[in-house]
Structures are given as structure tokens and as C-alpha cells.
Image (cartoon, rainbow, N blue to C red):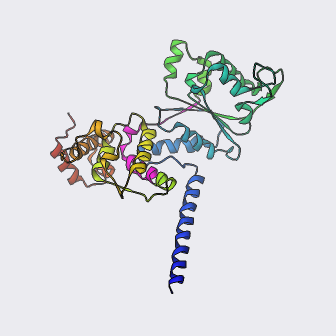
Amino acid sequence: DLEHMVRNATERKHLMTANSQLREKIEEMSPYHGIVGKSQAIRRVLEEIRMVAESDTTVLIRGESGTGKEVVARAIHATSLRRYMPIVVVNCGALAEGVLESELFGHEKGAFTGAHYRRKGKLEMADGGTLFLDEIGDIGPKTQVDLLRVLEEKKICRVGGNTYIPVDFRLVTATNKNLEEMVSEGTFREDFYYRLNVYSIAIPPLRQRTEDVPLLVDHFLRRFSNSMNKPVPSVSKEAMGLLLAHDWPGNVRELQNAMERAVLISQGGEIGPEALPFYSNSSRPAGSGKSLAEAESVHIHKVLEESEWNISRAARMLQIDRVTLYNKMKRYGLRRDQ
């Protein structure tokens, strides 16, 4: 009867919702949750994470802003022997040196004006786990000396205190600055640099792994559609062409923000080029018939450069056959000697 059909439909909907939530939980439990891609560059990063994970080696993560340095740090922690203890994150670039000292080392009651109670610092809170210091290139000379001493002596003293407290944590740092240049200029201590740079992982900018863009687009569309309780939209061919051709100066963070905006303003089942924040500045109006071709030409040229003009590899990356690729290269006048 009708009541039975309605009940079955409701149960099916609840089951689908539960399955969707379970999938999300499994994804969140995955140690590499948030690292999305299949490019050779991102596979290399994943291999380096696996290589350093179970050691206590200090790791320096390098990359432009928005490339996902914190995501990599969390993946290192999640696959390490310390994964059942906390990872404590500090953005060194967001705090003045005096504030950063208290944030890292904590303080005793009465240590300074406004210190009305004893407070543990991030170094103590990370005991047994991982301490991730983002924007490490922004810390001042005094904090560099203080942290170097902690790394050597494995103990800290709170601001205003006189008791040393033993600490045991794995240190992971990140920067978008050229630390070697800063060492040469005398703005970053050489001995501290060597303690940080035991092993370095370089995160490629998004423009160097454009084959990952469709996967990232799908990942973010699903995430934001779920959080906004909307159906997952598709992406038009022209919009995808523009996404592939964009240089992404803000890297993955810029793409994430673009997809959040696209889901927010989407009315139907498809995201067109007009939903992209950079469309009006970088594209001809819809209907000109040229935007998609230009975007495809730029994208194919990027992939050819990434593959060092290996036609077979470029065709695989583009998910087309060699003949189709040759035809497109001829159509767009793409040659290695350009």
C-alpha cells in the first residue's frame, strides 16, 4: 500500500544518508585525507610522507601559500607512531614575537601584566605527539634561539618560571620562504636551519599538477554540497576548460574557495563559467566561442611541458589517444620549439 511504499522510500533515504556519512567518516579516518591527486608530483609527496612517517625525523615542508602544507603535516602525524597523541599547530606568522613566546612556552601566574593564571604552552601540549610550526621563516632571532635550545635539551621553562619541564615531541615545520637565502642574509640562524632541515618535502604548486584539478574540483564540490545540503552539481565543459587553464596563484586554497563559491551560487545542476570568480577578468563573454578553445590550448601546452613533450605520457594525462592529441596540437599550432 501507499503507506508501505512511503516507509520504504524513507528507509532507503535514511540508509543512503547513513552510507554517505559513513563514507565521509572513512575518508576522514584515512591518514591521507585531504591530499587529493594522482599526478606524479603528488605521488612523490605521498611516498615521502610514507618514508618519514614512522621515524622521529624533523621535517621541513616547503611550498607556496595555499599548497596544503598543513595537510601534509597532518598526514605525517596521522601515519606516525605518535598518531594517538595530539598534533599541535601554531601559525608563527600570525603572532608578534612576544606573544609567540608565551604561546609556545606558556607562562606562570604574574609573569607579566594580564597573566592572571598559569598557562601551558604549545610545546607542553604537544608532549608525546607532534608540534607543527607553520610559517617558521617568520619567527624572530630570540625565538629561534629559544627553540634551538629546546630541540637540544628536550626541556622548556615557562615565561616567568624557574622550573624546567621535560618535553618529547616530533617537530614538523613549514615555510613559503627561501630559508637558505635568509641564512645568507643573516636573518635566520644557520644552526637552527640545520636542525629544521633534516628532511625536506617540497609541495608542488597547483599550476605544475593540472591533471589533479578535476579530482580536486570533484572533491571540493562534494564536500561543500554536503555541508550546504545541496545536490552535487556537474561542471560544464567550458567551465572545466577555464579551471584547467587558470594559473592558480593561490593554489589549492584558491580552488577550494572557488568551488565553495560555485556551490553557494549554483541554482541548477551544472556549474558554468560565470560561476567562477576569475571568469570576468580572464575570459571572453559566454557565446564568443573562443574561451573554451583557448583554455584547451593552454591546458594541452601545460601538460606537454609537464610530460617533457612525451606524447604517450601526455595523452595518458589528458585521457585521450595519441592521434587525438596530435590533431589538437596541429589545430592549436603547439610545437616544442615555441
Q: Is residue 63 above or below residue 159?
A: below
In the picture, the quarter occupied by the C terminus is top left
The structure residue drawn at horizontal position 54% and vertical position 49%, both measured from the top left corner, is 33
Where in the figure is residue 40, as x and y percent of width and height?
Answer: 41, 45
Where in the figure is residue 168, as x and y percent of width and height?
Answer: 74, 34
The structure residue drawn at horizontal position 21% and vertical position 46%, both measured from the top left corner, is 293
Q: Is residue 63 above or below residue 241?
A: above
Taking depth in this image into account, of 312 and 174 the one nearest to the observer is 174
The verdict on residue 208 being magenta is: yes
What residue span does the magenta drawing correspond to?
198-221
- Judged left or right of residue 58, residue 298 is left
Can residue 79 be seen? no
Taking depth in this image into account, of 35 and 255 the one nearest to the observer is 255
* Prevailing secondary structure of the magenta residues: helix
Can residue 238 be seen? yes
Where in the figure is residue 74, as x and y percent of width and height?
Answer: 59, 42
